[in-house]
Image (cartoon, coloured by chain):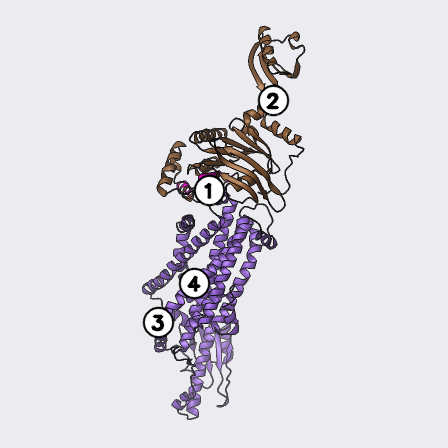
Chain colours: A purple, B brown
Amino acid sequence: MSKLWLIIQREYLSRVQKKSFVLTTLLTPLAFLVFFIFVGFIMSYEGDEARKIAVIDESDMMRKAIKDDATIFFSFPKESLDSLKAKTLREEYNGVLVIPPLSDIQTTEHTVQYYSDNQLSLDAESAIKDALSARLREYKIATLELDPKVVESLRTKVRIDPMPIADETQELSSMRTAIGAGIGFIMGIMMYLGVFIYGMMIMRSVMEEKTNRIVEVMISTIRPFQLMMGKIIGVGAVGLTQFLVWIILIPLISILVNLIFGFDTTQMQGAGAAAQQIDPDDMQSMIAMAMQELGQIEWWIIVPLFLVFFLLGYLLYASLFAAVGSAVGDDIADSQSLTLPISIPVLIAFYIMMVSVRSPHSTLAVWASIFPLFSPIVMPARLAFDVPWWQIALSVVLLAATVVFFVWISARIYRVGILMYGKKVTVKELGKWLFYKD
Amino acid sequence: MSNILELSHVVKAYQTTLAVDDVSFDMPKGSIFGLLGPNGAGKTSLIRIITSITRADSGRVLIDGIPLNIDHPEIIGYMPEERGLYKKMKVGEHLIYLARLKGLSATDANKAIDYWMDKFAIRDWWNKRVEELSKGMQQKIQFIATVIHKPKLIILDEPFSGLDPINSNLIKDEIHQLRNEGASIIFSTHRMEQVEEICERIVLINRGKNVLEGNVTDLRQERKKNLFSYEFTGELSSSLLEGQKIEEQGPGRIILHFPEEHLSNQFLSRLIQSGVYVRDFTEILPSLNEIFIRTVEEQGMTIDQPSNREA
């Protein structure tokens, strides 16, 4: 036991003390942030090219509706279309917008022409369309002598408020679904990345040990199983450390960035849909609701369960990666062909996870979250949606049993693999190793 | 004297080869013991059984009179033929790690490392990374790692491969000293001439079988052919050589075969009386290599290596 502890310590410390570890751990959240700021900047980018657009307003009712904004200037010259076209060719204008009068008050479509050899930007186009549409609506209401309040009352927003039937479940809001999906997605991604990043780390480390031949000295002192488990646990601890640092750092940095740059994440989200106007009050209440929902989520159940699935899922796949590493030594090509069978279930699980977040109680989601090869990734994604206890229990039990089985298989392969050199390794060959004597 | 190691009827088969085929031998405590044989003879397989890396299919292994168990690795120091270290670790940390895996406490490990580093005058390597060291330097570290926990049984597999003569001698000296301090040492090598002068006892292995075992001096004495070499300055008179069986003759050197040992001395005195200056007089004993080849031939075996060699 104390030897296992020594191995865990070395595997952990030798990684955590590396400069590259410190750097990636500290810089990844920063990189994420830079990425988000960058994306936000791109999303809110409206084009810095000022455009001058001449408008021929044949019904003379749009002047009020169309307003200049930062990059588009509208003018209403009293000139003929032909002369304006000519001016556009001479680049005095970027284009000519011709708004014909409304043919019929009942029409639901109205076409305007834009003369230019350059296309309007999407933002400008939707801004013009929205402005004209709003003005036409106003005009129609006035012409038809309708009461604007009555017209407004025709618009009814429909919201679906999920109500649980069983008494003990607390009331769910629609916000809950969105937040559950978000949490599920984040946990699913973390599982997926965790399995791959740290699984690969283990595989490389086993390959290195085998290639530089330290392994024979090691296993004359300790059992191969101890060496393998020490490595898996040590690297797992590295993973947890990294996650922990990120969980603390990411909110911290985003708060700092907010304070320093006054960078508003909500603005960033809104920026993508320029035309979509969100009432700031609405936004405020939505955030308040979201915070309330976040507070209502049963973290004390979800977080420990997530950790259980993370650890079991990690053990499952890490041991397989260790077995592959032991079998291939320094042959990268071999390692790729052998990691493929491991990667496929992880990838399938990842896609099922994305679907499960949207419909967490579908048959696919339920059974995938019970099937042990998928459950480490799919079940965490469903945890925020009040998964029945029997499903969680069944999933954990099956997963734990599978972990024991896979660790056993991997240990059998590992013990043969680390001392085997110069043999071309196939999946079939690995199967034979299972039955080798000690 | 009791035995540090006793093997009886040890068998180990791999999928396609019988790597160790009914090997038995005893190794006395405090001896330097040679485990000899060509490449692929099964030496490494045998060592892996003794070091608990693999298990024998059948047969019995006693270490210090006790059947092999999980505590034994701590009293064994093993330097494999293919040896490596963690390249990124610092030398000091690496040695502490290996020593602690062998059951030393942190304090004892530090003391032992201090002792060896002083001895090899490599104290300033402590904070160097293993990858900064040359191959020869790394071998010194590997040797220290092998003996750091004062093992009762030290097993060195091809210890001199890749070592320059200076470091080879350094290791040889240390081995003698360790033996004097009570350790028993197994040398495994296919370079038999390397161990003739170090080993007291040997076992010869060929194709997994134990073909010869015994005291090096006895083995060579038993198989000697009464060949004697004389080196001299001067002219040999033809009358002197009359009736002698000449094995080999060159300028200033002659090798003779005598039907009986004591005749060599008679020839020596006649040689001196004839006025020739004798510089050297030696009995030529067969080398272990010759003994090995002859024994294998006598037993009707071949030396060629098994095709499926376990690494």
Q: Name the subunit of mark 1.
A: B
- Quadrant in which residue A169 is drawn: bottom left
Rate crowding at label 1 as few (under 14), some (14 to 19) or many (20 or more) other CA atoms within 10 Å.
Answer: many
Residue A77 visible in the snapshot: no
**Mark 4 belongs to which amino acid?**
Val
The residue that mark 4 highlights is: A308
The residue type indicated by label 3 comes to Gly
**Cα–Cα span, label 3 and label 1:** 55 Å
Circle 1 residue: B73
Q: Which residues are magenta?
A: B75-95
Label 3 to label 4: alpha-carbon separation? 22 Å
Q: Residue A292, percent across and down?
A: 35, 74
Query: Which residue matches tag 3?
Result: A295
Residue A183 percent across, percent down from the top left: 42, 68
Q: CA distance from mark 2 to mark 4?
A: 73 Å
Q: Nearer the viewer, mark 3 or mark 4?
A: 4
Chain letter of disc 4? A
Q: CA distance from mark 2 to mark 3?
A: 93 Å
Going by the numbered disc 2, the residue's amino acid type is Lys
Residue B82 on the magenta span: yes
